[in-house]
Amino acid sequence: MKRRIAVAATLAATLLGAAACGSDSDSGGAPNANASVNGAGKTIKVWLMVDAQSGWPEVVKQANDRFTAATGAQVQVDYQQWTDHLAKLDTTLAGNDVPDVVELGNTEMPKYVFNGAFAPLEKSQFENSAQWLTGLSAPCELDGKTYCVPYYAGARVLLYRTDLFDKAGLAAPKTYDELVNAAKVLKEKNGSDKQFSAFYMPGKYWYAAMAWVHGNGGVIAKKDGDKWAGALSEPGAQAGLTKWAELAKTYSSGDPTKDENDQDAVYAQGKSGMLYGNGWELGAVQEQPKDPNNPASPKVKTKVNGKVATAPLPGIPSFLGGSDVAVTAKSPNADLAAKWAQIFTDAKSQEGLIAKGVLPNATSLLDKAAAVKGNEATALAAKETWFVPMAPKWSDVESANVLQNMLVSIATGKATVPDAAKDADAKINEILNAA
Amino acid sequence: MSVVDSPSAPPAQQPSASAPADGRARRRRRSATSGGFAPLALTLPAMLLLAGLLGYPLVRMVVLSFQSLGLRQLFGNLAPDNVGFANYVKIFTNETFYQVVGRTVAFTVVSVLLTLLLGLGVALLMRRVAPSVKIAMIVAMMFVWAMPQLVATQTFRWLVDSDFGVLNYLIDLLPGVDFANHSWFADPIQGWSVITSIVVWAGIPFIAITLNAGLTQVPKELLEAAVVDGASAWQTLRSITLPILKPLLIIVTTLSVIWNFGLFTQVWGVRNGRPEEEYQVLATWAYSTAFNNNNYGLGSAIAVVTVVLLLGVMAFYMRQMFRIGDVD
């Protein structure tokens, strides 16, 4: 009897041990975020963009803490810059020492999903996956499988100076014509200062210009059967580009060759009336870190503190920007990585993001986002958005700067709108249809 | 001399003197022809380093230029496809290639000329000023020379920044001139002026200090004789100084041409990693094609073409080096 119990006990222990080993296995099949993995002694590497470091570091910290509590594994977060993270990712993924989780912009995702950089995930394991914003989840889908998880979204809105508007007797514009009128009035009243921009619009700001294109019935490219064709020469797109050019050339004193990366700092100097930016830029223009090289340094108020408000830009649908996170195909800790992604994108983490003025990844949470003060405009804007053409080679168009170069030649007056659009269409055709 | 000229000197005549002389002749002949393993062994570490750091990547790049490699192969650890000369055909039938080469050549000519003129001017100036001023000049040039290219580029970029730059602010102070928010890069001519300034500024120290060393070779007596004969400063420079400096000038020019042809950092830094079409030169174009468009085969082909274009210049440089060695 004693021997039989001993044998049964040993058998049970072995079976339990084998089962534990089995669920630990990361090889073969999709990474399982709900697997119970003992991550003691392991560290997963996560690549996030600098926006998380400067905008919502507490959200990252709470996700890491919950992850460590659940699995015992540590998290090492490396923050990447937008300018070079793709080149860095390409070279890293070609090797064997790869990060486990990577954040990419939603327009950058299709190229990597298409080229097999990421592992397929089990969609049902992620909270709110049935209500994911299409602009964030569409880049993740390929052949019926999901390769990444929506993280956060941003919708662009109009930021305007309440004090300048009050002085000029203007109200927040409700139609596009009112917007142009407001710019004209502001320019008349403040035009003596050569540095004043009624509407600060940098020349390379393609998210803005393409929003104008979509707002006037145009699109960037259309799919005709098997081939893609650039559609910027069509009447709707031409009308949008012309209206955008009016703002950029007449009402903006901004650098026509710069993009929107500096626009918050420029707006904070107090010499601009209006701006087209993401919801969180409302905070960024009113407060800046004391030490520009240290995003964690205490914030100081800028010249425009307390004088800025947001409103939806009338007549112009917002570009649904944002990011997704994905588990790399070569990751040695795929299950742990999937679990981290699960925690980082669940409802509790999303609440932290919403509190910071960022839009969540699911439509069910959009109303909660609208309830946050200052976020009403962005949440409203997120309901009507546009997205880039869903072509596998779309990010090549972005990295070849086709749209940016077209806009710069329009803004500097080097080319007319029809000519610049024709050139851009030719390049888009070439890149999107390349073998 | 006699040891080499008369190897068959009879050893019997002066046994004590000629025996060591004869031995020396034999040893010298042996070292001139076979050399033993010593020279080879001494250069071996350097050769291995060169082969590993420069030779292997160069070979891999040439091989890659005949292949087609994209992200899919990289991520899936697949082998690239061999496409023969397709990449080269694509380059030579592309109008952009000729524009880029033209731009690179134009920039090289202009920047090397400017650097030489200003460098020579500074070197001549250094010969004439008081020693304390000369030392101050050398110290200043050392700082410029020591500054890393990227740091210098970023500093210049901030100086000419349209919204926050000092240059626009200062020029705007002039009455009647409106330079607030002026963009230095909207017009490619102005943008290239900025880039050329950075390159020339960084290149002057090397030219000035090298030419200053070369100027010490000009005999003082010749210059004094020329002054006595009534030659003007310009005639002295043209007829005496420059001919003596010629070999050094040629070497320094060739080096500058090779360095400036491969211009990359300044353009990349000043356009923030995304140069517009008017700012692309061969090196940046190769990099953009390879790493931004992920077409590694095509990027390698452009790089190979750049190297081949420079081969002619390099051959000229090597010939000059050998010539100088012979004179010595």
Image (tube, rainbow, N blue to C red):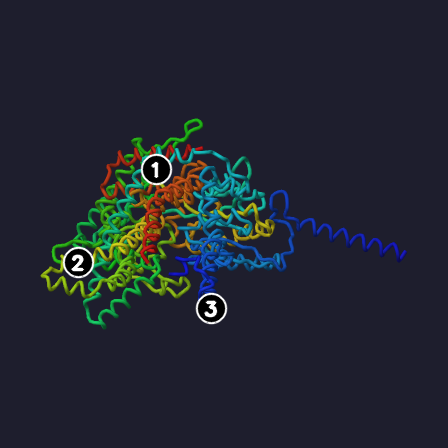
- Circle 1 residue: A214
Residue B16, numbered label: 3
Q: Quadrant of the C terminus of chain B?
A: bottom left
Camera-nearest residue between B160 and A57: B160
The answer to whether residue A311 shows anywhere in this view is: no
Camera-nearest residue between B49 and A93: B49
The crowding category of the residue bearing disc 3, from other C-alpha atoms within 10 Å (few below 14, some 14 to 19, many at least 20), is few
Query: Is residue A391 found left or right of A195 in the rendered image?
Result: right
Amino acid type, mark 1: His
Above or below, A267 relative to A115: below
Q: Quadrant of the N terminus of chain B?
A: bottom left
* In this view, the mark in front (3 or 1): 3
Query: Is residue A81 found left or right of B182 in the rendered image?
Result: right
Could you tell me residue B305's position as x and y percent? 38, 41
**Residue found 56% across the figure and 44% down from its top:** A119
Residue A379, numbered label: none
Residue B237, numbered label: 2
Above or below, A122 relative to A291: above
Q: Which residue lies furthest to the top in this view?
A: A225
Could you tell me residue B16's position as x and y percent? 47, 68
Secondary structure category for the residue under label 2: helix
